[in-house]
Image: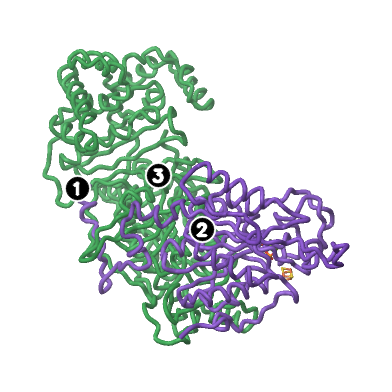
Amino acid sequence: MALKVGDYKTDVHNDWCPGCGDFGIVNAIQMALAEMEIPRHQSAIFSGIGCSGKTSHFINVFGVHTLHGRVLPFAQGAKISNPNLEIIAVGGDGDGLGIGAGHFVAAGRRNVNMTYIIFDNAVYGLTKGQASPTLKLGEKTKSLPTPNTNYDVNPIGLAIASGFTFAARGYSYDVRQLKNLIIAAVRHKGLAFLDVLQPCPTYNDINTKDWFSGEDRIDETTKKPMPRIYKLEDTDYDPVVHYSDETELNQKKTQAIVKSLEWDSKIPTGIFYKNELITPYTRRLTDKIPNYVENPSALQNISKNNVPITKINQILDSYKV
Amino acid sequence: MVSDFTWMIGGPQGSGVETAANIFSQVFSKMGYQIFGKREYYSNIKGEHSYFAVRISDKKIRSSVKGTNMLIAFDAETIFRHVDDVLENGIIIYDSTLENMKISDVITFENDFKDRLENILKSKNKESNVKGMLELASENGVTIHSVSFRSLLTELSEKLENPRIKNMSRMFNVLGVSLSLGLLMIPSEKLTESINSIFSKKKSIADMNVSAANFAYNYAAAKFDEPNFKFKAKEIEENTLLVQGYYGTSLGKIIAGCRFQSYYPITPATDESNFLETNEILEINEDRPGSTLVIQTEDEISAIGMAIGSSLTGVRSATCTSGPGFVLMAECLSWAGINEVPVVITFYQRSGPSTGLPTRHGQDDLLCAINSGVGEFPRIVYASGNVSDSFYDTTQVFNYADIFQIPVIHMLDKFIASSVTTCQRFDETKVNIDRGKLLDEIPSDNYRRFAHTEDGISPRSKLGLENGIFWNTGDESDIQGHISEDPVNRIQMMDKRQSRLDYILEKIPESEQIVKHSEGDFCIVSWGSTQGPILDTIEMLKNEGINIGFVEIKLLHPFPKELLKKSLSNSKTIIDIEANYTGQLGSLIRQNLEKDPNYYILKFTGRPMTCTELYDTLKKIINNNAEKREVLTYGA
Ligand SMILES: Cc1ncc(C[n+]2csc(CCOP(=O)(O)OP(=O)(O)O)c2C)c(N)n1
Ligand code: SF4
Ligand SMILES: [Mg+2]
């Protein structure tokens, strides 16, 4: 029986603020799971701590709400142990790029076949609006006593520099595009990163929904707002690395980083970079453990009638006096 | 015939002291002797002083003694640091070219040590050089053999017509051990045999070392006077192994079915992960090969995070670390606690605080293991006293983790990790695997991960199991795993988790909680690797007709209060022995038994206790002239 979007919803009360961008992201994840027809028990959402961290409780698949900044280690441990699981890790920008930044970089280097979505609202929502690593230098959002003194980190750029093999950006009020990006990320063979611009109406009074849709920029002739967001798929931008060729690889990485720096008047969404020519972690493991995919840790028998079945006599023999 | 003998070799890190000791240990184990070797080294890769002391005996031994019968030195530092370790009638073989080296020539000495040494030599009217040092030894009745290691190489290189050998000072280690064996008149085939086995990966290197070994062996046999020490080969006891300390937990993990280990490098824990990765492909009875995934992570937070993630898929998973890594794990540990996740943390202690003495022994993290973490949650802290125990205990801690669905912290230390001993072959048939309430199948869709049950433990699903969907959160949760701040639910959940502590004391057999090795009016209480020196000391005293009791506490948390009370009920004087400053077990005893141990014997220099110094201190206690707190200090 085919599952519908509703089957992926729990009845847990959602306590996000009215109008929060997070709602769109949860909807998009549920729609993507339904469209890909992923059985509920074969999927798990791992989340960090923050407003965004509550996401796992709203989706009716396995849900692991971890610790602040630690979602990637938990998620990778599960995925590596059981590669048959479809794992989506989610968390805030503070979670992933502040306290969890070390894990972000290390995860990129591993390239485990899973998806990581950052809810990028430029603030620490759950702790009441402090500056997050993606808030621009000098900006002063609502609850900051003084303007931000740190330069912002570029999530797409950091992902590419760290070795993520898929980097995309979505916008939480464009649920259809976001759903498609999630599907593309899940289907990508390797570690996929998705940075979602997520307005926080409560604490971020700069990057608001109106700001993204250009309500402050009225076209003289049409008298309509000129949206800041545009889609890479509407341009001739090609994010894919097609050949195992260093020149092309460098060009695609550079182009993506340069593209991701566009801000203020023009903000691109869509896939910035995609490279399936880098070996996923699974392959790296299979190179040393040939039957890893068929017989990963989670599927191995370790005992029969409570008696261990692993043989250690050969190792012991080598220490015999 | 000699029944107890210690041989020591020292040299800069990277000079192959360990290989030499390995050869020595193999040779004597093949002659039917029991071995106990310990390795000491600085936190350094090349150049700082390291040494290996190998004790051999014709009866069971579990610790080192104070002093050595023989010392091999091919650098000046070894002479300065260890000459006063050489016992009366002992032997020193040293490189004659070092004779005129002064204390000030040794750049690796700590200033304090230098001053201390110079003062000693001055007070004895000796020059502050190697010669002066050796004169001291000579006056103490030590026989000194001087050999130019360099000339030995030159002669060998001429004999083999291989000019390269002349400069191979990295073979000094093999020369040193071979000179010793030649002097002690140990059959040379044993030497050849063990060199071949140690260098088995590269034939040309093995051959060259065998030539050098035989050359040095013959030199010593011909030139040195016959020593007082005589050894005779005996029948090798059946099923004897010669093992490194960390093999116990490594092999325990493999047979227990641990299939995932994540770690961040730290001494002395890394060796275990290395072992697991080297043996990552596993032979399985009547099945395709299995494997252990060993993942080097970016830090210890990730190491435990990954192990927990793995455990959620139903895998037996673990991480292995030392103090500085363990404290980083505290937050994740609490997460495993509130989410009832079985995970094993193998904790090889070293000496703190902070990075402290990074490559030295210590038992100063007991309270840290018991208390680290956010809030109140159940855990087990369990300690092993020797290599062989650590094998069986490892298989048990995985059972505890699964049965009680909690994190288990398995305490070991540097002393165990880096000792080399003979022991009985680990017996796989004694191992059983109990996965507790882990489910393989769930028939219908009303599963609740944290459902309340009679014994407080809920049937456990795993990620990927049909009908077994659950939620986890570090927040307090309801029976499904969704966040709940309801006060009534909170009480139920706290009771559910915390009641496990009593349940653990009820379920784990008494013999696994506390081992009562012996009884006596005087009774030692201790935990972990002090077991070896304590048992050796008890035997020494027994030979004099003195019976001392010894209660080893293995389950340290939850604390087996009633059982300990019972175990100590016949003893008048309680002696707490630990390798730390404050007596951490002692504080648990005070807290739980409302009774202060009568004596504390403590050591915190980072050097393991020897049975000799324990013996001396216990004698003082028995003769009623000890302080309440006795601090041991022996060891360079
Ligand atoms: C170790 C730790 N430090 C601090 C906190 C407090 N804390 C909770 S959420 C949060 C920030 C959340 O910001 P972000 O990750 O951007 O998520 P958002 O709420 O914006 O979705 C912080 C600092 C914590 N839970 N754990
Ligand atoms: S604080 Fe911001 S991010 Fe958090 S729920 Fe409210 S609107 Fe959303
Ligand atoms: Mg945020």
Residue A319 visible in the picture = yes
- Give, as a three-letter code, the residue at label 3: Thr
Give the label, 2 or 3, closer to the camera. Answer: 2
User: Mark 2 and mark 3, same subunit?
Assistant: no
Badge 2 is on which residue? Answer: A191
Q: Which of the labelled discs sits on residue B535, or is there none?
A: none
Badge 1 is on which residue? Answer: A320
- Give, as a three-letter code, the residue at label 2: Leu
Colouring used for the render: by chain
Residue A120 location (% of width, % of height): 68, 62
Q: Earlier in the sequence, mark 1 or mark 2?
A: 2
Chain of residue at mark 2: A
Q: Secondary structure at mark 1?
A: loop
Q: Quadrant of residue A181?
A: bottom right
Give the label, 1 or 2, closer to the camera. Answer: 2
Quarter of the image that includes the C terminus of chain A = top left
Q: Secondary structure at mark 2?
A: loop
Q: Quadrant of ligand 2?
A: bottom right
On screen, B526 above or below B145? below
- Residue farthest toward the front in the current orientation of the protein: A221
| Measured Cα–Cα span from mark 1 to mark 2 | 45 Å
Chain of residue at mark 3: B
Q: Looking at this view, is A14 or A37 the one in front? A: A37
On screen, B414 above or below A119? above
Residue B227 visible in the picture = no
Chain of residue at mark 1: A
Measuring 49% from the left and 49% from the top, which residue is drawn there? B628
| Measured Cα–Cα span from mark 2 to mark 3 | 61 Å
Q: Which of the labelled discs sits on residue B617, or is there none?
A: 3
| Chain A visual colour | purple
Mark 2 nearby-residue class (10 Å; few <14, some 14–19, many ≥20): many
Mark 3 nearby-residue class (10 Å; few <14, some 14–19, many ≥20): some
